[in-house]
Amino acid sequence: MNTQAEAIAAPDATRPPRRRLLDVRHLTKHYPITKGILRREVGRVRAVDDVSFHVDEGETLGLVGESGCGKTSTGRCLLRAIDPTSGEILFDRGNGEVVDIAKVDGRALKSLRRDMQMVFQDPFSSLNPRWTLLDIVGEPLVAFGMKPGRTLEERVADLLQRVGLRPEYMHRYPHAFSGGERQRIGIARALALNPKLVVADEPVSALDVSVRAQTLNLLEDLQAELGLTYVFISHDLSVVQHICDRVVVMYVGQVVEVTETNRLFYTPRHPYTEALLSAVPKPDPDLISAHLPLKGEVADPSRVPPGCAFHPRCPYAVDRCRTVEPQLESLDGTLVRCHRARELSLRGVE
Amino acid sequence: MSVATAPAAAEGASTAKVDINTTSQWGLIWHKFTRHRLAVICGVIVLLLYVVAAFVEFIAPYDPEAQAAANAYQAPTPIHFFDAEGNFHLQPFIYGTSSKRNLDTFELEFVEDTSVRYPIGLFVKGQPYKLWGLIPGDIRLFGVSDTKAQMFLLGADRQGRDMLSRIIHGTRISMSIGLVGVIMSFFIGIVVGGISGYFGGVVDIVCQRIIEFIRSIPTIPLWLGLAAALPSNWSSLQIYFSITVILSLIGWTGLAQVVRGRALALREEDFIMAARLSGSSRSKIIFKHMVPSFMSHIIAALTLAVPEMIIAETALSFLGLGLRYPAISWGVLLQEAQNLRSVALAPWLLAPGAMVVLAVLALNFLGDGLRDAADPYRR
Amino acid sequence: MTEPSSRDDLLLEVKDLRTGFALREGYVKSVDGASFNVRRGETIGIVGESGCGKSITARSILRIAGTNDDRLGGEILYHRRRGDGTSGVVDLLKLPSNGRAIRSIRGAEIAMIFQEPMTAFSPVHTIGNQIIEAIRLHQPLSKDEARAVAIDMLRRVEMSNAESRIDAYPHQLSGGMRQRAMIAMALVCRPQLLLADEPTTALDVTTQAQILALIRQLKTELGMSVMMITHDLGVIAETAQHVAVMYLGKVVETADVRSLFRDPRHPYTRALLASVPKLGRESGQRLNPVKGMVPSPFNRPVGCPFNTRCPQMIPGVCDRAMPAPTTVGATHQVSCFLYGDTTTSEPGEKAA
C-alpha cells in the first residue's frame, strides 16, 4: 500500500468534531412516466434512490457523478426547490432546533430559506435579465422584509464588494457582464441572507477555464470568511479534489461511495470511482493511464439494472452482483456499496 | 460545456448611441424597434390615425350628415394651383361647380365654373359642431370659407354628403372598436394563458382544448349569428359595445396562446427557481418576474390583434349586421358601395376600403416590428 | 520556420491565417495570424479559451467558417496525396468556398466532427441516411453497397447493434452513441485529416474516455492525422503529440506536448497551466487565475494580444508591436518578446 496515500488518508485526530449540519436519510425522488390520456404510470425515473449522507458544519461536501446520477436532483431536494418523494433531510438550525426540510411547509419553510441558498450552473439563465443587480441581489433581502432604500443599497453594495464587483455596478443589468462576473452576482445573491448552507450546482462548469480559477478562489475565500458550509455538485473531478473535504459518489440515483477526499482519490473502494478517476484526462502527458476505458453507456435512471446498478459495466462483476442489490457498508472509514469491496484492490490517482 | 464569454462590456465599451450597461428592457426594445424603419413609419401612421380619430369633428371639413340632393354622386373636386390663365397661386383653390342633368343618360353632370375661385385655407370657419358631443366649436382644420362652394375632395355619396368627412368620422369608430375589443381580450387572454402555462398538467390540457375548439369555429358565421341575435331596437352605442364584446370573446385565444407559451418557457428558467429560493411569494414571482418577461410579447400580440378586430367590424357592418345608420364606420360606409351600379357610377365610394387597407397594413407592420423587438435578450 | 526534417510528411501548413466577420459594429478579427503545421499520422492539439479563434481556424480549413471571404488572408497549404498516386499542394483558401474542388475534399479527404452531435445531424433523417449520403457523395456505390459500408463503419466505432441502430433517428440515441455516429459519418470515406472541434466537451467523463480512445484507435487503423480542438488541457495531454496554443486569434506557442507541459514558455501558457486544478499530488494548492479578462474582439490591444494581462509585460515593447515566432527548441516556438526581440515584418497591429 502506498504509505504516502495512507498518511494523507488517516483522519486528523486533533481536529475537534464538527457539528452535524445536515443529515440526509433515505432521500428518494421518483418521477412517474405516464402514457395515454388517462396518464397511466408505466414506469418511474428513479432520479434519487434511497440516498443517505451527512454534512458537517464548515466543510465542503462534493456530490459527483455523471449525467443521470441524481446529484442535481439531490441538491434541489436539499433546498426544497423540488419536493422529495420520501425520506428525511434533518437540518440543525443551531439553536437546538432540528427541522426536517422534507416535511416543513409554509411559514416555517420560508424562514428556512434564510439558512440555505443555491448557486446555479448557468450564469445566463440564473439572473433575470430585466432586473438590475440591485434588484437581483436585493431580492432575498426584500423578501424578508427589508424596505427598498438606503439600507438595502448599502447591504447590496457590501455584498457586491465581497464578491469582487464594484458597488456602482448595482444599477447595471446582467447583460453588461461576462459569464464569470454574472456568476459572482449569483454568489452575492446567495450570500445576502447570511446562509449557513450553500448548495453550489456546477458553479464553474459553464465558465471559461481561466475564469474558473477566480471563481473557485472566491468560493474558498468566502467559506473561510463567513464560515459557510458547501454542498458542491460537480462532474469535474479535478475541481472536486481541489475544493472538497469529503465526497459522495453517485451512480443512477444511488450513493456508491462516501469518504474523505484524499481517501477517495488515492484509495477508492468502488469500481465506478476507480473508473471515473482513470477516465479523467490529466494535464500531464506522462500520466496517460493504462487503464481501459469503461465499457457501456451511463445507465438510464428509468431502467435501472437489477442487482447492483453498475454490474453491466463493472470489470469486476460476479454472479451475485447481477441479482442481489448491495447495501451501503462501512469499510475503513469509507461507506461503499459493493459486494466485493473488501476483496478488491483498486487504483486511485498518483 | 463552455459558454462563450460574451464580448464583455468592458469599461467604457458601448455601442454607438446606447449605453447597454444601464439600459433597461424597455430601452433595449426601443433601440431594436427604431432600427426597423418600416415599423417606425407605420407607427407614425397609426399614431396619426388615432389623432384623427380623436378630433374628427375638427378635422373633417363638413358635417357628415349634411345632405343636398343636388350634389348626389358628385365626383371628387380637383384642387388647383394654377388658374385658367396659367397663374400660380400659393394657396390651392377649387372652382365652383354647377350641375346639369344629362337628358340622355339622366345622370347629373358636374361642370367646373372657372370664373369662380374658392381658396382652401386652414382653420376656416365652417359648419358648427360639438367636439366629442360636448365642446361646441366651428373652426375646422381646413376648408373653403365661402358656403356657396362645394369641396368634395373624395366625392359625394348618393345623398350628396361629403365622403371625406364621412370617412374621417368613420375613423373614430373603426379604430377604437379595435382597441376596446383588444383590451378586453387582454384580460381574458392573460388570465387563461397564465393559468394554463403556470400550472401545466391537466389544467393546461383542458384550457388548450377549449382554445382550440373556439378557434376552429368559422368566424364569419359565428359573428353573424351573434350579431343577428342583438335586438334591433338597441341604440348605436349599445350595439357598439355589444359588437366589441362579441369580437373580443373570440379574439382572446391568440393572446392566451402567446402568454401560455411564454409562461411555460419561463417556469424552467433558473432565475424563477432562484426567486423561490430567495423567499419571494408566488404573486411576486408572477407579477415581478414572469409578467415583465412576457409583457413585450403581449404588446406585440395585441398590436397584431387590432387589425383583426377592425376587419371583423368592417365585415359585420358591411354585411349589415354590425353597426348601422346613423353610426358611421368604414364598414357602414362600404355598405353603400354594395351594388355594382353605384360603384360604376361613383368609384370613390370604395375609398373607405382603402382606409381599411391602410390602417390594417400599418398596424400589421407595426406589430411585426414590435414582435421582432419584443425579446431583446434572445441569444 | 519548420523543422529541418523532411517536408514530405507534412499534411497541412497553415500560414498566417487571417479571417473575421464584418458586423454592423465593425470588422471583427477572429483569427489574426495563425501559423502551424500538421504532419501525417500526427495529432495536433489546438488549445485556447472561448474567443481565441480555434474553431474558426478549423472551419476555415474546410471553408465553412462563414467569414467574409474578401478579407481572407494567409495560406492553408494542403499536401494532397491521392489513391492513384498523384499528389500536389493546394491552397485551400484560394478555392471558391462552395466550388466543386473544396466539396470534393470535404468528407472525403478532410472531415470534421463537432461538439454537439444533436445539432450536427438532421433530426428528420436517420443516421443511416446521413452516413449513406456522405458515402455516395464521394464514392460511386449503390444504395445497398453504401449501406453495407455504413454498417461496417458503425461496427468500427463500437456501436452495438449496428444493423438496427443504423435506422435510428438522432434523438433516439444517447450522447455517446450520437458522437460515435458522427465519427462514423466523418470517417466513412477514410479522410486523411480529421478536424475534431471539442468532440467530447458535452459528454460525461467516462464516455469521453471511450470516445478519445476510439479516435486514437481509428487514427492508427486509418493512418490519418487529427486536429483536436479543445480548451481542456487534460485532453490535449492525453491525445496530442504536438500542440498550438491560441489566444485572441493568434498562435502564441507551438511545441511537442511534453515540452509544452514541462517547459511552457509563453506567459499565457504558463498562466493557463497554473490556473487549472490538478488531480493527484498537486491538488489543493491555491489556484493562480490569469488576472483580468479576455479583451473584447472589438478592442484588441495594440501589440501582443496578451500584454494587458501578462505578468511579465515589458512596457513600450509588448504594447507596440507583435512578436514574431522564435524557435526555442527543436520543435518549440514562442511568439513572445521575452525570447527574442524580432518583430514581425508587418506594421504594428492597430486596434480594430
Image (cartoon, grey):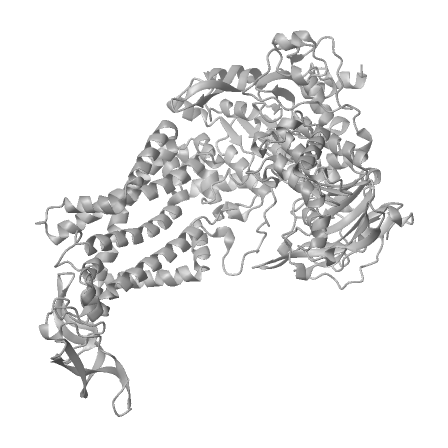
Q: Is residue C284 visible?
A: no
Establish if C53 lies above or below A272.
Answer: below
What is the number of callouts on the image? Answer: 0
The C terminus of chain C lies in quadrant: bottom right
Residues A323 and B200: in front is A323
Residues A161 and A333: in front is A333
Q: Is residue B374 left or right of residue B360?
A: right
Establish if B26 lies above or below B139.
Answer: above
Residue B356 position by quadrant? bottom left
Residue B11 locus on image (x, y percent)? 58, 53
Establish if C349 lies above or below A81.
Answer: below
Residue B107 position by quadrant? bottom left
Q: Residue furthest left?
A: B233
Residue C281 locus on image (x, y percent)? 77, 26
Please name the residue shown 62% across and 12% down the image. Answer: A308
Q: Is residue C98 left or right of residue A151?
A: right
Please name the residue shown 17% across and 51% down the image. Answer: B321
